[in-house]
Amino acid sequence: MNFKTDKVKTMERVNEHLAHFRSQYPNKEWVGIFLVGSQNYDLATEESDIDTRIFIVPSFEDVALN
């Protein structure tokens, strides 16, 4: 497979994950979105999915009341 093509496809999926998060939680401040899983270990295949983690900044209410 073409590395550049794979990288572009991966970034497109990461951006889709971020867009979905932002649509579900429009008032949450996010710090970063990170790629996790098989792509990090060069174990991804054509069938591999894209796994991400999003780190958010909790609101004062989240910290104080939860």
Image (cartoon, helix red, strand yellow):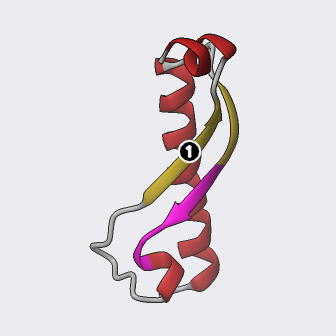
Q: Main secondary structure of the magenta part?
A: strand
**Which of 46 and 29 lies nearest the eye of the viewer?**
29
Q: Quadrant of residue 63?
A: top right
Return the residue nearer the eye: 3 or 62: 62
What amino acid does circle 1 point to? Answer: Ile
Percent x, y of residue 58: 63, 26
Q: Secondary structure at mark 1?
A: strand
The residue drawn where x is 52% and y is 79% is: 40
Q: Is residue 54 above or below residue 62?
A: below
Identified at 61% across, 65% down, the residue is 8
39 falls in the magenta region: no
Q: Is 57 rendered above or below residue 55? A: above
In the rendered image, residue 44, in percent from the top left (x then y), is placed at 39, 81
How many residues crowd mark 1 within 10 Å: few (<14), some (14–19), many (20+)? few
Q: Position of residue 66 (x, y in %)?
A: 47, 18
Q: Residue furthest front?
A: 64
Query: Magenta region: which residues?
Result: 33-38
Q: Quadrant of residue 26?
A: top right
The residue singled out by tag 1 in the image is 54
54 to 39, vertically: above or below: above
Say which residue appears at 32% left-offset and 72% top-offset.
Answer: 48
Say left or right for 4 vs 44: right
Question: In this view, which residue lies farthest toward the left?
Answer: 47
Numbered circles on residues, count: 1
Residue that appears at 56% across and 38% down: 18
